[in-house]
Image: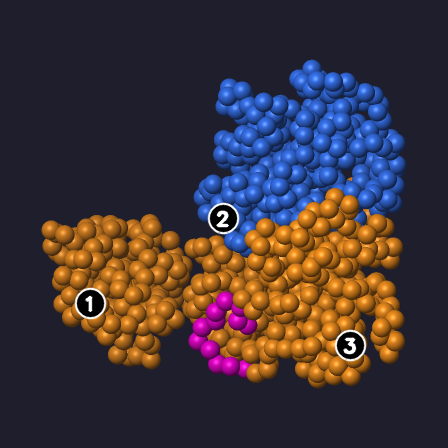
Amino acid sequence: MKSEKLKALEAEAIGIFWEIASEFRKPVMLYSIGKDSAVMLHIAMKAFRPGRLPFPLLHVDTRWKFRDMIAFRDDTAKRLGLDLIIHVNQDGVARGIDPIRSGSALHTQVMKTEALKQALVRHAFDAAFGGARRDEEKSRAKERILSFRSAEHGWDPRNQRPEMWRLFNTRIAPGETVRAFPLSNWTEIDVWEYILAEDIPVVPLYFARKRPVVRRSGAWIMVDDERLPLEPGERPELRTVRFRSLGCYPFTGAIESEADSIAAIVAELKAARTSERQGRLIDDDEDSSMERKKREGYF
Amino acid sequence: MATGGDLLRVLTCGSVDDGKSTLLGRLLHDTDRIFDDHAAVLARDSRRYGTTGAEADLALLADGLEAEREQGITIDVAYRQFATPRRAFIVADTPGHEQYTRNMATGASTSELAILLVDARKGVLGQTKRHATICSLLGIRHVLLAVNKIDLVDFDRAAFDRIAADFASFAGGLGFADIRPVPISARHGDNVTARSERTPWYRGPTLLDHLETVAVERDTSEAPFRFLVQWVSRPHGDFRGFAGTVLSGTIRAGDDIVVAASGRTGRVARILGPGDERDRAGPGDAVTLTLADALDVTRGDLLAQPSARPTVADQFTANLVWTSDEPLLPGRSYLMRIGARWVPATVTMIKHKLNVETLEHLSARQLRLNEIASCNLATGAAIAFDPYAENRATGAFILVDRFSNATAAAGMIEHSLRRAENVHIERLSLDKAARAALKLQKPATIWFTGLSAAGKSTIARAVEAKLHALGRHTMMLDGDNLRHGLTRDLGFTDADRVENIRRVGEVAKLMVEAGLIVVCAFISPFRAERAMVRAMFDEGEFFEIYVDTPIAECIRRDPKGLYAKATSGRLPNFTGIDSAYEAPERPELTLSTAGTSAEELALDVLKRCGYI
């Protein structure tokens, strides 16, 4: 059974899908494979049933996603008959950008931020749905449901439109785009309680299992394949860990946990003392790094 | 961190330094929403930016953007969540600076309760009154008056009572359902989530107690049924559903409904999901309705209960909160979004501006950023609505600038204007085509725009003379024959220029109705007004001719000596000197006057308009 709050959040998100699908010429859903994307996709399917999704999905593949994520993505696309576009920044590949040698900042900039801009321009998408939530991070708390981006895809926090009631100002000039966040008002717990109530499949990495990990910067880094170079003296050990948030694998830390089901995850979160982005090494460079990345066009 | 039952949307507002961000940080902190890693960042930031010495500065938890932490101010609306076992809360944190009133209105538009902060040392200020007025206008019915920094007045009961009484006397006319004053210290936590031993004289609830228990009239299931159609679902030939949100009231399968705008009625066959079929739907539900009858329904239609229909009108009175840097000019055409429809709209009159601190009515010809006024508006098509005081969902709209796409205003409808409801446009038995047929000509407006001394009138006169020679019935409109009569009350401010062009457009339209070819020569410097005039005519009836003479050449010609006066400062608001000229983006014809005679240019115009 869903709580009154979850029902209200679901209805709000469905309304946002209808609005954006109607008001924009060519929307797309940014699908990042994680739990928020899973919920967003599930709600979108509900919004347009018995019809099909009136827009495609886009996955920006940095080529450093966990293998389980890619398998889950392909499975989901097949199971639901989705129109899924996979975009890799080939220019970045040609330049040999990789997170180990290039560092997290450059890798994110080229393979994620630049790649996303490339894909939006190539397909001439004018609106992109994203699964970001206001409770994720401080600069997200100021984000609009409909976030306006300049023709250069930049986000200017001082030049966002006031969002009155649910009356979205959807008018944009040629070249300008918007990002739409149907899950703006959801919290991490809401997401999991909804996954539990609706029985939505998620990537197995969210569940505690024994996995080979090494300890780095206070986080457990999973050794997903041979591409992760081990430092001298480092030896992977098997620990029962799970991921609270999924990103590119050398930057995403696992947490020690016994939560091996959705219900156990909900219970664990209710007692949690750390935030979900805590395992994300890319946000940690500097406290304001998320705000900077967003101004440059990061999701 | 527990999960609440229902969801309450709360607005925090108050003057600069009243402690809004600190209070919000305190609520997040005391309800366990501060995670260890955030606390570590807070400790670091408090040393770097904080104002509380060695203690953690809780305000930094709420001030999200880098720019804000550096300047120590909140510059935008932030939405935060916390939950207790009894309720979940979404809090809109809005800035106290006067210039950010629009952000407060934004936060208020979706909120059910306002926490209004007052500094116990300063009492009720002009800003406090401004915020209370905006809350009231935006339809918030519940106020928690948080008398903050009570520690700094030594927990003095008399100070608290005086502030509560001051506020009550101001807010008496604002229509709040309840006002709950609470003495607090956000910094130290007194009466925020736990009762303070330092205010033994206070017997009311803590701030959080009140938030958890206050009853709001959220449930509008008893109100008349309103449903906004947002998406027409036609996946295959046998299914046609109308997806949208129940804005108020309740609908059951088998109920009768009316399409508000067309007045056509039908019956609901099925109510679908999300996910399942159901027999009823209530406020806030997103569902798909199928109808038993084949009714013409499109996105933006309002479906309603036939026994309690919304008003359908094209003229009405509304309160506007102006949110754009560009001032409101009466007569200028904006785009209005109401529900899921976009219609052209014009403010026909500013009835009065509101002084939000004294509630006095002031006369005004313009409305600037953050000002509030009661205005009359006219829309290009009839719209369905309820007064905002009765229904926040169907009585609200926004105005959008046609050129910058900026959100120019938030509007709340008060009532329709009687004449719009009762006076229908007279169905004339003779029409434009009949009159034009008698004259054997195609009526049109040929509109010349360009700088002063560009050559508009000279070419326009040549055009009129040639048309006359061809046996066409024409009329010339220019400043010379209008400024002495019809528009003699107008000057050259931006507002007056807009009104001037609106009147010219209306006159030209009547003359086209009469079957004439109207030749107009006006500087008409703003794109918005030219677009407004164009919108008055049918397709192919309006020709915008841009006389593109460089300003240097106009200054050289200067037949009336006006540029000389303007550049020496003796003629203010002169286009091209200290007032802008916005060149047309897609005129029907652009004329370059260098080296070509007016006679030759006139022939180009007649060709372009199809008269030769």
- Colour that chain B carries in the picture: orange
Please state which amino acid type lies under the numbered disc 3.
Asp
Instruction: Using the image, name the chain to which the residue with label 2 belongs.
Output: A
In screen coordinates, is B68 left or right of B258? Answer: left
Within 10 Å of disc 1 (Cα), the crowding (few <14, some 14-19, many 20+) is: many
Instruction: Using the image, name the chain to which the residue with label 3 belongs.
Output: B
Q: Nearer the viewer, residue B86 or B293?
A: B86
The residue beneath circle 2 is A172
The quadrant of the rendering that contains the N terminus of chain A is top right
Residue range (magenta): B361-372
Residue B611 visible from this viewpoint: no
Please state which amino acid type lies under the numbered disc 2.
Ile
Residue B563 - label: 1
Q: Nearer the viewer, residue A173 or B284?
A: A173
Q: How many marks?
A: 3
Image height of B364 relative to A206, above or below = below
In screen coordinates, is A95 left or right of B526? Answer: right
Examine the image and state in which quarter residue B387 appears.
Answer: bottom right
Residue B154 - label: 3
Residue at (68%, 26%) from the top-left corner? A250
- Colour that chain A carries in the picture: blue
Examine the image and state in which quarter residue B331 appears.
Answer: bottom left
Instruction: Using the image, name the chain to which the residue with label 1 belongs.
Output: B
Mark 3 or mark 2, whichever is nearer to me: 3
Q: Are marks 2 and 1 in contact (CB under 8 Å)?
A: no
